[in-house]
Amino acid sequence: MSEKTRYSDEELNEFRDIILEKLNKAKKTYDDLRAIITNSDGNDVTDTSPTFKVLEEGASTLSKEEAGRLAQNQMKFIQNLQSALIRIENKTYGICRETGKLIPKERLRAVPHATLSIEAKNSGVK
């Protein structure tokens, strides 16, 4: 029996469902982070009222900066998931970009946007 070179359409559909679920959650998290940054979730005066609470303002700025970094990371994650969906459509999903072998299902279930097998990742190949 020869070694499988790609996942079946049924297996790809399973991965598509996993990715779509993660994508929906990631988009919700991204929207929540954007709301923190833009203060669009409230109709209060926290960003316009004069205040002498310098420490609180510093903490608020730091929180928005952290939310900005998290939002950037979340957007990168969303883009990686979207790229994985394209690979599913192209039927190239789950194939290690370095070794050309199938990435184990367990790894893809845990990291559905993975493009490297554990062996390739650990060998430092990029």
Image: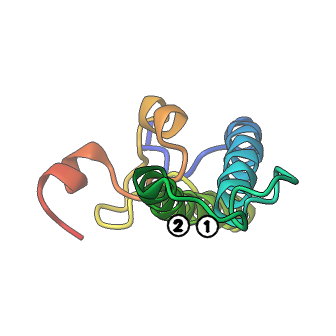
Task: Classify residue 15 by image quadrant.
Answer: top right
The three-letter amino acid code for the residue at tag 2 is Gln
User: Would you name the residue on which mark 2 appears?
Assistant: 72
Category of crowding for the residue at label 2, using alpha-carbon neighbours closer than 10 angstroms: few (below 14), some (14–19), many (at least 20):
some
How many labels, in total?
A: 2
Front-most of residues 63 and 78: 63
User: Would you name the residue on which mark 1 appears?
Assistant: 79
Marks 1 and 2: in contact by CB < 8 Å? no
In the structure shown, which secondary structural element does the residue marked by tag 1 occupy? helix
Front-most of residues 4 and 1: 4
Task: Classify residue 96 by image quadrant.
Answer: bottom left
The three-letter amino acid code for the residue at tag 1 is Gln
Front-most of residues 29 and 64: 64
Residue 92 is situated, as x and y percent measured from the top left of the image, at: 58, 63
Pick whichever of labels 2 and 1 is earlier in the sequence: 2
Query: Label 2 to label 1, Cα distance in Å?
Result: 11 Å
In the structure shown, which secondary structural element does the residue marked by tag 2 occupy? helix
